[in-house]
Amino acid sequence: MSNASAPKMIFVNLPVKDLSASIAFYEAVGAVANKDFADDSAQMLSFSDSIHVMLLTHERFTSFTPRRIPDAHETAQVLLALSEVNREQVDVTTGKALAAGGTEPNPQQDHGFMYGRSFADLDGHIWEVTWMDLEAALAANKEATA
């Protein structure tokens, strides 16, 4: 298989204040640590074969950019989204995050064909956990634009 036909992957790089605590948090949510990509300043964790989170200490993160690291408890640069297979799994994943010390910064959203909740990790990075019935969503969109 050539690289041209390989599926694209995403690697989300997040600055964290306490690398060990953040690793434990993401493992509790369901990500799996990859010890091949880890040292005392970074740890890669995977949610799937194509979704990876690279936790980086602030010192390591600043080696990639001269920009200031904002406090994600006060500002938002991105909202990360993670899909789930059904509504119940949205609640399970969010529950794991809350039990591991995360917070739920936004109210749940229930549109019938789409359901979502969110959690903020220990550093305030917000993850939207969502489920959507794609056929029902497309039908609703078609009705709305007709």
Image: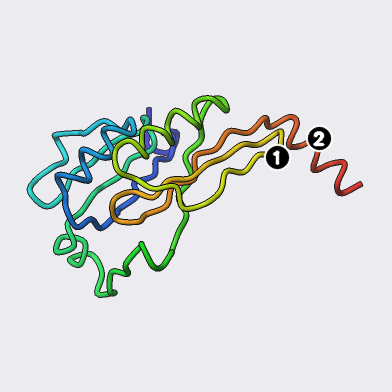
Q: Amino acid at mark 1?
A: His
Q: Residue at x 45, y 59 (%)?
A: 78
Q: Residues within 10 Å of mark 1 (few under 14, many from 20)?
A: few
Residue 121 shown left or right of residue 90 in the figure: left
Quadrant of residue 69 within the rendered picture: bottom left
Kindly identify which residue carries mark 2.
Answer: 139
Residue 116 shown left or right of residue 16 in the figure: right
Residue 138 is situated, as x and y percent measured from the top left of the image, at 76, 37
Task: Name the N-terminal-most of marks 1 and 2.
Answer: 1
Residue 141 lies, with reference to residue 31, above or below; the image says below
Q: Amino acid at mark 2?
A: Ala
Q: Residue furthest right?
A: 146
In space, the residues marked 1 and 2 are separated at their CA atoms by 13 Å
Residue 38 shown left or right of residue 22 in the figure: left
Residue 61 is situated, as x and y percent measured from the top left of the image, at 21, 61
Q: Residue at x 39, y 44 (%)?
A: 10
Residue 74 lies, with reference to residue 28, above or below; the image says below
Residue 83 is situated, as x and y percent measured from the top left of the image, at 51, 35
Camera-side residue: 51 or 123?
123
Quadrant holding the N terminus: top left
Q: Secondary structure at mark 2?
A: helix
Q: Nearer the viewer, mark 1 or mark 2?
A: 1
Kindly identify which residue carries mark 1.
Answer: 111
Q: Residue at x 43, y 64 (%)?
A: 76
Q: Residue furthest left?
A: 40
Q: Residue at x 42, y 52 (%)?
A: 126
Residue 122 is situated, as x and y percent measured from the top left of the image, at 29, 51
Camera-side residue: 50 or 111?
111
